[in-house]
Amino acid sequence: MKKDKLVTPSYCFILAANFLLYFGFWLLIPVLPFYLLEEFQVSNTTIGVVLSCYTIAALCIRPFSGYLLDTFSRKPLYLFAYFIFTLVFAGYMVAGLLTLFILLRIVHGISFGMVTVGGNTVVIDIMPSSRRGEGLGYYGLSNNIAMSIGPMFGLFLHSAGVSYITIFSYSLVSCILGFLAACLVKTSYRPPVKREPISLDRFILLKGIPAGICLLLMSIPYGMTTNYVAMYAKQIGLTAETGFFFTLMAIGMAISRLFSGKLVDKGMVTGVIQAGLYLVCLCYFSLTACGWLVDWNVTFTTVLFFAISLLLGIGFGTMFPAYNTLFVNLAPNNQRGTATSTYLTSWDLGIGIGMLTGGYIAEIASFRISYLFGAALTVISLFYFQFKAGPDYNKYKLR
């Protein structure tokens, strides 16, 4: 039987737009803690608060963005959010006060919340439903490729003594090119849909709440990892280039997405998520152990540290297409935006909590204890999915 066509010009353009958006995003992620520390001389707790403003702002807009995307034309909203997201990078280049930087982070978070929900929803609209898991896997892969080179490039620029204004300009140029690619995406006409009265399920996919709780618990240590892993390595005495941590993590995600999306299309949604959760649990306990093992053997700990990044990428990369499909399968077609926003809201909330708690725990104890806390949360997420969220999905799924 001939497969429905997945690769079209519009699909390629939205992959490019997604890659360039996330390249600009990931380039700054590991650099911003150093920027705040060096330019404003703030504490780890303050760094966590400032960085979390971005995620909290994205979190606040997610439910509303899903409703707007289900109500109005999706592409114009997507392009508007992409434009604002790009513009803020120019704002960073002239922000000389911490207060102004925080305001820009909030605006950036709001636009990020809208553009990511918009992108995920538009890509679902332009791909055949029979290849949704595979298509979402490749779409996420464009993020992973950006993640593989963005943080490493950003840390390389920082280590080389490049000014922060120059680093911000790289992100700006990347997103300008991405915006141009997004403009070339063609979407089919979507006739107006009769709207039910405003209610909670227009903003949050209620059937997806159990899965959202699992995703939230899992994303807390992920938020700690993306923002503090370079500082953690420095604190425990690892001298290797930590930018490779993100590269290996992204390679792991890329490898796993090549097969996980196809397994999801075969109906193995819950099984794929559980497999990924087991691996992620193991990785976070191992990452915590690095804080003690380094006193025994630095070389072994360095090898383990980077092996963890690869396996962590495989674990998360296995789960992402499955989780996205899980939420979409729980919603009718006219609530795809709401389903996507619920998925991403859960993820963003966990990352925001991870930034705050990671910085706070490191301030009163150490980053090692922060990751131990995160590892414990992955165990809770695993058991909750196995006994609550997974069975609920099998009970309420629509397709």
Image (spheres, rainbow, N blue to C red):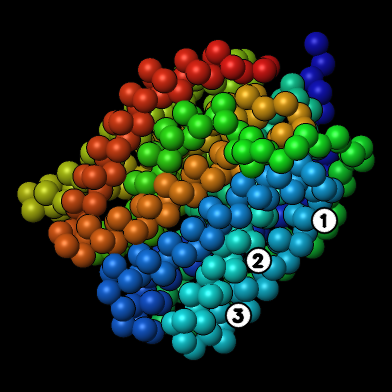
Question: In this figure, which residue is indicated by the disc labeled 1?
Answer: 76
Amino acid found under the numbered disc labelled 2: Phe
Q: Where is residue 197 in the image (x, y as percent from the top left)?
A: 75, 37
Confirm or deny contact between disc 1 and disc 3 (CB under 8 A). Answer: no
Label placed on residue 91: 3
Q: Which residue is drawn at 64% across and 35% down?
A: 201
Q: Is mark 2 on a helix, strand or loop?
A: helix
Amino acid found under the numbered disc labelled 1: Pro
Q: Distance between the residues labelled 2 and 3?
A: 10 Å
Q: Is residue 194 above or below residue 155?
A: above
Indicate the quadrant where residue 21 lies: bottom right
Q: Where is residue 131 in the image (x, y as percent from the top left)?
A: 72, 25
Q: In this view, does 193 lie to the left or right of 398?
A: right
Q: How far apart are marks 2 and 1 (CA)?
A: 14 Å
Q: What element carries label 3?
A: helix
Question: In this figure, which residue is indicated by the disc labeled 2?
Answer: 85
Q: Distance between the residues labelled 1 and 3?
A: 23 Å
